[in-house]
Image: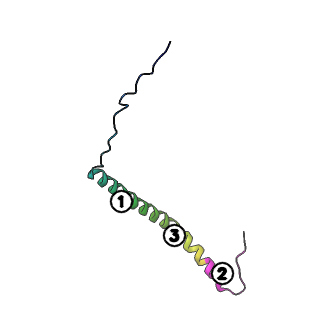
Amino acid sequence: MNRQSAPEPNAGAYVTRTRPSPYAWLVLALALVFGLLLSDYMSRQVLSAVYPLLKSDWQHQSALHTIPGCRRRAK
């Protein structure tokens, strides 16, 4: 009972690699540009939403530093 394993299909074939088409590079470049623009848009939206809070806190802290001997206590 000597069994031989079946040969792999295309076992002796060479794998050839083709160069990506210029269309693929164009799609990649457009996807990267779109991702960067989307990231910029989202960060601007977050900053515009948080800006009033940052501004009021910064004004409060700068007002405390102008009063001599007044320091903000740790919470």
- Farthest residue, direction front: 2
The dot on residue 51 is 3
Tell me the amino acid under the disc marked 2.
Leu
Of labels 3 and 1, earlier in sequence is: 1
Q: Which residue is mark 2?
A: 64
First to last magenta residue range: 60-75
- Gap in Å between the C-alphas at discs 1 and 2? 44 Å
Is 67 left, or right, of 16 in this rendering?
A: right
Tell me the amino acid under the disc marked 1.
Val
Residue 60 spot, x, y in % from top left: 62, 77
Residue 5 spot, x, y in % from top left: 45, 21
Q: Which residue is mark 1?
A: 33
Q: What residue is shown at x 39% (from left), y 57% (from top)?
A: 35
Q: Tag 1's secondary structure?
A: helix
Of labels 1 and 2, earlier in sequence is: 1
Of labels 2 and 3, earlier in sequence is: 3
Q: Tag 2's secondary structure?
A: helix
Q: What residue is shown at x 72% (from left), y 85% (from top)?
A: 69
Residue 65 highlighted magenta (yes or no): yes
Tell me the amino acid under the disc marked 3.
Tyr
Q: Decide: few, some or many residues near mark 3? Use Cα within 10 Å; few <14, some 14-19, many ≥20.
A: few
Q: Decide: few, some or many residues near mark 2? Use Cα within 10 Å; few <14, some 14-19, many ≥20.
A: some
Residue 20 spot, x, y in % from top left: 30, 49
Q: Quadrant of residue 30?
A: bottom left
